Image: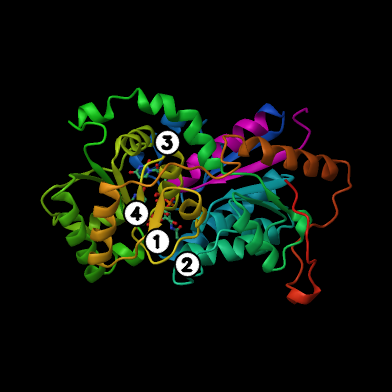
Amino acid sequence: MTPSGPHAVVVAGARPNFIKVKPVLDALEAAGVRTTLVHTGQHYDDAMSGVFFADLGLRRPDHHLEAGSGSHAVQTAAVMTAFEPLLDELAPDVVVVVGDVNSTLACALVAAKSAVPVAHVEAGLRSGDRTMPEEINRIVTDRLSDLLFAPSPEGVDHLLAEGARPEDVHLVGNVMVDTLLACRERAHARPTLAELGLRPGGYGLVTLHRPSNVDDPAVLEGLLAALGEIADRCPLVFPVHPRTAGRLAGRLPAGVRALGPAGYLDCVALQMGARLVLTDSGGVQEESTVLGVPCLTLRESTERPITVTEGTNRVVGCSRAAIVSAAVEWLDSPPPPRRPALWDGRAGERITAVLVRSLGRRHDGQLSSTRVPASRPIAERDTNPSVHS
Ligand code: UD1
Ligand code: UDP
């Protein structure tokens, strides 16, 4: 396709977004689709942004919105205010948003109001917990999106149950896994463990950054106490997210070693070598499943239940006793490795195949409105909807 052909604006703003856009950008470019990469600036430190561009070989963003940190309203509004005039100027055929961060919602909302079709990668995930800011972002982004790319079948079920048209929903697999599989060998070759004096299988890895875990001092204290008990049996390393860094104030139990936020390849290397992962991260639940490493999710729910039913994850909640007893159990008898179907490294290609079809139709003036219709009662919905893949 020529530069005057279809044009996709791809949005990334926060750490997990950079990892998710890489395979989509690569596949779109391989298919000859013109892409514009927009960095919203939600994450801006080198350790939260720059290192991912270097590790992933992600090209420099074409536009940087410099939205920065703030309350939800301030941050979302900053992204929207900067994205709106840019979108007017770019006039793309589609805006591709990934994941569930504030930048995802902000850009989806601007695009939808500008009548630019929105494609949501990682659609349909639901934790069922609306106290999670990400759950609000997921619900609203999906409602606004024209193309819904689900990583797993339960995502499809949620979308259909909420009234999405089956023809807009595509089961494509998991882009985070695309990047993981593409980078696994490079991560393995890194001297990460040696430089930290760690031996494979000789430590556990911790990541924590959910506001429900780290913003409430009582909850954080219980989690740290649990980590201290586990560290008596298995030393822990803890690359600390900047949100969490402000809350820890140096009070880590013995045996728990804090590091700065890890770069992507280092984080994958740390997961690959870990005997156990303890996390509240969405992406780490998925990656540990694909790497076959036992994972305990320190939350009351997950929007990624497939990592439990078809992976190595267990959701243990946040109570000290429950976390410690699950950790002891899995240190003694780890779960067998398993991997969900379609988590095979080809999600970016599947997404691109759908986008190319849709963009081609739009360019030929044939793209009809594909907006998600108003929710209909279950009885009126197709009982056996076909889902496009
Ligand atoms: C955000 C996402 C969350 C995602 C996480 C990935 C929302 C609502 N939350 O959470 O879904 O799991 O990113 O890591 O979008 N900060 C820095 N340097 C940075 C970025 C942030 O120091 O480069 C600090 C700031 O003090 C900021 C705080 O971290 O206030 C939180 O950042 P923010 O992007 O608002 O939320 P996260 O907790 O990172
Ligand atoms: N990650 C990283 N360094 C870290 C912690 C996580 O590179 O110190 C990677 C991790 O391997 C995964 C992604 O960041 O690819 C997950 O992002 P995060 O946990 O910040 O957000 P979530 O997935 O919970 O939205």
Look at the numbered disc 1 and give the secondary structure of its residue: loop
Circle 1 residue: 70
Which residue occupies the extreme front position in the image? 333
Residue 359: image location, x then y, percent: 78, 42
Q: Left of 87 or right of it: where is 14?
A: left
Give the residue at x 10% y 51%: 254
CB atoms at circles 1 and 2 under 8 Å apart? yes
Circle 2 residue: 73
Residue 360: image location, x then y, percent: 82, 39
Mark found first going from the N terminus, 1 or 3: 3
Image quadrant in which the N terminus is located: top right
- Looking at the image, residue 64 lies above or below residue 220: above
Mark found first going from the N terminus, 4 or 1: 1
CB atoms at circles 2 and 3 under 8 Å apart? no
Mark found first going from the N terminus, 2 or 4: 2
Q: Quadrant of residue 192?
A: top left
Residue 296's label in the rendered image is: 4
Q: Residues within 10 Å of mark 3 (few under 14, many from 20)?
A: many
Q: Amino acid at mark 3?
A: Phe
Look at the numbered disc 2 and give the secondary structure of its residue: helix
CB atoms at circles 4 and 3 under 8 Å apart? no
Q: Which residues are magenta?
A: 1-29
